[in-house]
């Protein structure tokens, strides 16, 4: 039996730089790994089958689950005779822009690489991860921060010591990633032009993180999916405006939402804001860079 932590992510920066021929959007995104984790248990099965166990009502326990697909890709691709029982203890809210499912799939790839003694290196695991979803490759890298380009699936580690504190609010709103991208109406040529502006660049955010300049870090958050997300649910814009009234350094939506995170200077500040928000929202977390 193997027990693994499967962490969530935030997108501190997500810029759409074009639309690709395959229909996907070309991104520049900065991922932050956070300490909100699911737990994954892998138990070898002699009968060669793949089984998923999870008690969360929104998580499918069949081949629709991308953790199942991860195991199946390795099994079929490498003719593995063994099977596995994958037990997922969910703590990361589902379909929330936090990469929970993608992280589970990446954790299964890493875990089975060991359990089934496959000896795959990271680039080989990335090839499998890309087939499962755009956010999966990030979770294969042992890093707190990374830059994602192409579909968000081409990963470059960013070595930073910054430990950030966030209050994370997950409203009970369904936000399908495909639908959000479908609403994107950015005039992409203009977007491309403005990328050249010096003060509007992911490198500025990385620079502020390197200097641990928390106020500037919060000011450099960006998510180009936000207009599409607010189009689908205007109440999320109101929530963002409300969060700005607290003593925070910056606020943004993670990925395609609906999770929204605020940056605070200290853990006690984050806990104080969480206490106030818990009166109105069921899912409020204090999270830190992991
Ligand atoms: O890769 P993943 O399956 O997570 O993507 C879900 C959907 O989000 C895609 O079908 C696509 O519509 C959209 N997407 C996109 N551009 C990206 C990532 C996702 O258009 N870079």
Image: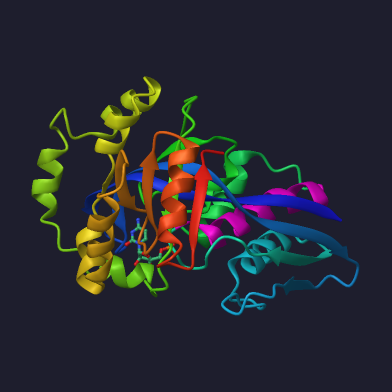
In the image, what residue occupies the spot 25% across and 50% down? 245
- Left or right, 113 with respect to 230, comes to right
Q: Nearer the viewer, residue 71 or 9?
A: 9
The front one of 26 and 54 is: 54
Q: Is residue 157 left or right of residue 57?
A: left
Q: Position of residue 94 (x, y in %)?
A: 52, 68
Q: Is residue 149 visible?
A: no
* Quadrant position of residue 50: bottom right
Quadrant hosting ligand 1: bottom left
Q: Secondary structure of the magenta portion, mostly?
A: helix
What range is drawn magenta here?
Answer: 98-117
In the rendered image, which quarter is residue 58 located in? bottom right
The structure's colour scheme is rainbow
Report the side of 5 relative to 42 (left or right): left
- Where does the C terminus fall, quadrant-wise? top right
Decide if residue 69 is on the left or right side of residue 4: left
Q: Is residue 112 above or below residue 119?
A: below
Can residue 52 be seen in this snapshot?
yes
Q: Tell me, yes or no, whether the highlighted magenta stretch contains residue 105.
A: yes
Q: Percent from the top left, x then y, of residue 268?
A: 48, 39
At 27% across and 30% down in the image, what residue appears? 216
- Asked if residue 116 is among those painted magenta in the image, a careful observer would answer yes
Q: Residue furthest right?
A: 46
**161 shown above or below 155:** above
Q: Nearer the viewer, residue 174 or 156?
A: 174
């Amino acid at each position: 039996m193997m027990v693994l932590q499967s962490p969530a992510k935030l997108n501190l920066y997500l810029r759409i730089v074009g639309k690709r021929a395959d229909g996907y959007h070309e991104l520049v995104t900065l991922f932050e790994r956070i300490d909100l984790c699911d737990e994954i248990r892998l138990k070898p099965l002699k009968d060669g089958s793949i089984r998923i166990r999870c008690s969360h009502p929104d998580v499918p326990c069949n081949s629709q689950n991308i953790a199942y697909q991860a195991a199946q890709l390795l099994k079929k691709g490498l003719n593995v005779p063994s099977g596995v029982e994958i037990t997922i203890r969910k703590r990361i809210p589902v379909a929330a822009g936090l990469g929970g499912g993608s992280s589970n799939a990446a954790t299964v790839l890493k875990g089975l690489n060991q359990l089934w003694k496959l000896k795959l290196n990271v680039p080989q695991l990335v090839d499998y991860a890309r087939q499962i979803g755009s956010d999966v490759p990030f979770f294969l890298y042992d890093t707190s921060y990374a830059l994602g380009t192409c579909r968000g699936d081409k990963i470059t580690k960013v070595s930073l010591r910054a430990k950030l504190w966030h209050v994370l609010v997950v409203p009970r709103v369904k936000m399908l990633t495909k639908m959000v991208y479908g609403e994107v109406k950015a005039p992409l040529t203009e977007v491309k032009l403005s990328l050249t502006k010096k003060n509007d660049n992911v490198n500025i955010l990385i620079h502020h993180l390197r200097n641990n300049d928390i106020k500037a870090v919060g000011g450099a958050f960006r998510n180009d999916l936000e207009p599409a997300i607010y189009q689908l649910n205007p109440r999320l814009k109101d929530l963002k405006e409300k969060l700005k009234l607290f003593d925070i350094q910056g606020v943004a939506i993670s990925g395609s939402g609906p999770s929204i995170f605020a940056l605070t200077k200290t853990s006690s500040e984050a806990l104080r804001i969480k206490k106030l928000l818990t009166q109105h929202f069921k899912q409020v977390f204090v999270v830190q860079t992991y």
